[in-house]
Image (cartoon, rainbow, N blue to C red):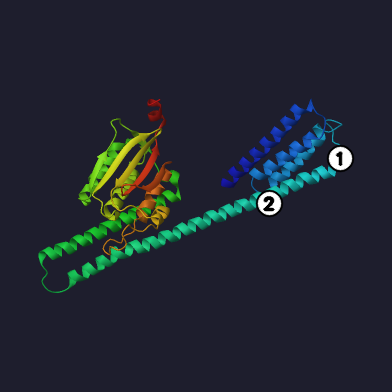
Amino acid sequence: MDKFRQGLADLTKTLALMGAAFMVCLALRRYNTGTYASMIFILAVFLTARYTNGYLWGIGASCLGVLAVNYVFTYPYFAFNFTLTGYPVAVLCMLVVSVATSALTTQNKRQEAARIIAEKEKTRSNLLRAISHDLRTPLTGILGTATLLEEPGEMPEAVRRQLAREIREDAGWLIRMVENLLTITRIDGDAAAGIAKTAEPAEEVLASAAAKHRKRYETPEVRLRVPQELLMVPMDPVLIEQVITNLLENAAVHARGATRIELRLFREGDTAVVEVEDDGCGLSPAQLHNVFSGFAQNRYAEDADKRRGMGIGLSVCYTIIRAHGGSFSARNVPEGGAVFRFSLPLGEEETNSRA
């Protein structure tokens, strides 16, 4: 089915370009009786070979162009004459243009496809390294804590509860990691199938994410700022809430020295913008460069107890927002800290209501 659609599209392009060349030659015929027709059809053959796949359509356009020039635009008109001076040269030129252009186009497309595959492989490799790095620490912690609980002898109740709490926290983090990975797989496999957008009140999604975050992290304090107007934003609310949750957790866990997190929602043109800002240590130049690559390390590698990388969560955020047709960016605040910002396009109804 894909080959049929591609062939139909190439046929349409070929006929459209050759038809356009024919109409231009007819329009110019009343002013000029020279060799303009050959040049125009050579241009049409070039464009056909450039914007179709393979050699067939370009060669077909060459033959069609030669016949059209001979029959319609060369004396005697509306009759074939294959004994004209220079006729073999015209045929040869069109065929050379067609074959050369098709060859270059095919080569460029293959190189582009190879580049895309190489980038995907690089991203997959970075993702696998990040996963192995991020999963090792909590799994090691769970194994070590479980071993302590299995040891014979009396253990104070407070210590036992602390160990159980650490296991629960590490297990919860692993579950969120798996959810993030499943989200990336679902959206990257088929973005159109992975995103089901409905108009949702954005402030409710932010409030829900902030409330869930406060249950897990008491500090830093999360301040929610929303506009007075109600913003109805086309989105998958579950996925957008996951983005906000990842950003809040990233600030809580990785922003060393942070005392507050601001979660802001506002309108900017025809987009709804969400920002998560902290007053922590900010991002290094290397982190800013790799922040959405899936292998961005945390902001304080010297802390042995908090070596969970932040790259997977941010990579998930980037993937979700990109699938929504939005944009994602990160920057440092001059006064200290970092801002993660994403925007989502508003629906036509919401945009028109402000016009």
Mark drawn on residue 103: 2
Looking at marks 2 and 1 on the same chain, the residue that comes earlier in the sequence is marked by: 1
Q: Is residue 167 above or below residue 333?
A: below
Q: Is residue 92 above or below residue 297?
A: above
SS of the residue at dot 1? loop
- Picture quadrant of residue 264: top left
- Picture quadrant of residue 125: bottom left
Residue 40 visible from this viewpoint: yes
Q: Nearer the viewer, residue 92 or 11?
A: 92
- Left or right? Give the position of 201 relative to 98: left
**Callout 2 environment at 10 Å: few (<14), some (14 to 19), or many (20+)?**
some
- Left or right? Give the position of 14 relative to 89: left
Find the distance from the CA under tag 2 to the CA under tag 1.
Answer: 29 Å
All told, the count of numbered labels is: 2
Return the x and y of residue 21 as percentages of the image width and height: 72, 34
Residue 293 visible from this viewpoint: no
Q: Nearer the viewer, residue 117 or 80?
A: 117
Q: Label 2 is placed on what type of residue?
A: Ala
Return the x and y of residue 191 as percentages of the image width and height: 44, 46
Quadrant for the N terminus in the image: top right
Rendered residue at 74%/27% (across/down): 27
- Left or right? Give the position of 290 relative to 262: right
- Picture quadrant of residue 271: top left
Which residue matches tag 1? 82
Residue farthest along the front direction in this orientation = 335
Mark drawn on residue 96: none
Rendered residue at 59%/54% (across/down): 111
Q: Label 1 is placed on what type of residue?
A: Phe
Return the x and y of residue 64 as percentages of the image width and height: 75, 39
Q: Nearer the viewer, residue 39 or 14?
A: 39
For the residues carrying marks 2 and 1, which lies nearer the camera in this image?
2
